[in-house]
Image (spheres, grey):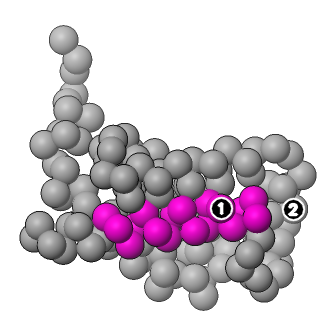
Amino acid sequence: MKTASLIARLLLGLIFLTFGLNGFLHFIPLPPPTGVAAQFFGALFSSPYWMTIFALQALGGILLLLNRYVSLALVFLAGIIFNILVFHIFMAPAGLPLAFFVIALWIVVALRNKQHLAPIFVARSE
């Protein structure tokens, strides 16, 4: 499990660092979206909100690759991964396999760090 977690953490970090930086530098050409996905991206990129999304992706990827603040990286990447999943379910189903792969990687890393994530699921704080 230790080796699988290491590989999953590094892959997850590389994926989010690559796509986070791609949001700013555009070194991976992506096909233009169509239909509702195009409308969604049009609204997203008409404001500076997209910079926050890509910055958090890149930061999360860096933290995972450096093995620093992994639990923090997992927490804010969870929100991004959830939005990626919902986007692909409702607007671009062709990307679902990659979304499920990222979710599987996240779960493997989260299971390795469950002792640090457990306090998040406490019903009441003292």
Q: Magenta part of the protein: which range? A: 9-25
Q: Secondary structure at mark 2?
A: helix
**Above or below, comparing residue 111 to residue 19 in the picture:** above
Q: Alpha-carbon neighbours of circle 1 within 10 Å: few (<14), some, or many (≥20)?
A: some
Tell me if I can see residue 107 in this picture.
no
Residue 118's label in the rendered image is: none
Is residue 77 or residue 15 the one in the foreground? 15
Q: Position of residue 104 (x, y in %)?
A: 32, 72
Q: Position of residue 28 (x, y in %)?
A: 71, 79
Q: Amino acid at mark 2?
A: Gly
Q: Earlier in the sequence, mark 1 or mark 2?
A: 1
Tag 1 residue: 21
* Left or right, 63 with reference to 59: left
Residue positioned most to the top: 126
Q: Main secondary structure of the magenta part?
A: helix
Q: Amino acid at mark 1?
A: Leu
Q: Alpha-carbon neighbours of circle 2 within 10 Å: few (<14), some, or many (≥20)?
A: few
**Above or below, comparing residue 68 to residue 58 in the picture:** above
Q: Residue at x 31, y 52 (%)?
A: 67
* Left or right, 71 with reference to 24: left
